[in-house]
Amino acid sequence: GAVVSQHPSRVICKSGTSVKIECRSLDFQATTMFWYRQFPKKSLMLMATSNEGSKATYEQGVEKDKFLINHASLTLSTLTVTSAHPEDSSFYICSAGTGTGASPLHFGNGTRLTVT
Amino acid sequence: GQNIDQPTEMTATEGAIVQINCTYQTSGFNGLFWYQQHAGEAPTFLSYNVLDGLEEKGRFSSFLSRSKGYSYLLLKELQMKDSASYLCAARDSNYQLIWGAGTKLIIKP
């Protein structure tokens, strides 16, 4: 159980275009989902916390107008990278948990974004 | 501030045992997690500790000492497929996860 599906796994786009990444919890409801970014050989960097039915909470230094997050239902959160630039090229990973106790975060398989 | 420290890289031999240490400093504490991450893939959950002591799960065990702000992940009977990065993450009083930079484990035949 507790499967998180992330799509697409890889995407290449041109500078100036927008890319949408979907994150779905397949067998559980996730009121909160997390979006991370990871640079090569670096740890996970939390970008924002996505809350169902309300605005996302962005971490310091993350541009909310550039990284649009929508959490329209208990099973779907989307991250849209707007007006992408080469420096946005990275590995983006979403995660969701079933609660705050011993339950761990379950991660999607990640999206490798390359902006040319 | 909040901080997680773990070694950057470790090397071990197939069939051997390796211990990956993690020290943490957080505002409050609500558990410590270990994740495995293969290159280019998302992290997968390995273990969770919230009370002091050792939790054993097959070849992997995790230990926690809250008074020392210390945890370790013990991997036994190492296999080549265990080559990966191992991420330590502590949950603070707000249930936010604080991540370590990960330990890259290299297994040699």
Image: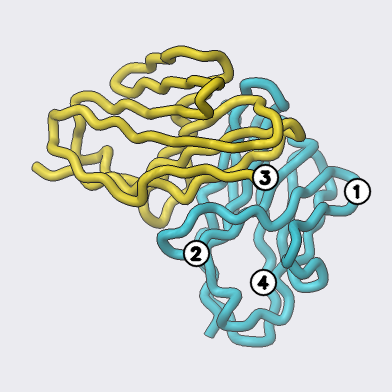
Chain colours: A cyan, B yellow
Residue occupying the point 45% across, 28% down? B71
- Residue toward you, B46 or A45: A45
Q: Earlier in the sequence, mark 3 or mark 4?
A: 4
Residue occupying the point 49% across, 20% down? B65
Nearer to us of marks 2 and 1 is 2
Q: Callout 2: 10 Å neighbours few (<14), some, many (20+)? A: few
- Residue toward you, B95 or B58: B95
- Residue toward you, A106 or A59: A59
C-alpha distance separating marks 3 and 1: 17 Å
Mark drawn on residue A24: 3
Q: Callout 3: 10 Å neighbours few (<14), some, many (20+)? A: many
The kind of residue tagged 4 is Val
Q: Is residue B11 visible?
A: yes
Q: Earlier in the sequence, mark 2 or mark 3?
A: 3
Q: Chain of mark 4?
A: A
Q: Which residue is mark 2?
A: A39
Q: Name the image quarter holding residue B29.
A: top right
Nearer to us of marks 4 and 2 is 2
Q: Callout 4: 10 Å neighbours few (<14), some, many (20+)? A: some
The kind of residue tagged 3 is Arg
C-alpha distance separating marks 2 and 1: 28 Å
Q: Position of residue A75 (x, y in %)?
A: 74, 40
Q: Which residue is mark 1?
A: A54
User: Label 3's element?
Assistant: strand
Is residue B79 shown left or right of residue A65? left
Mark drawn on residue A19: 4
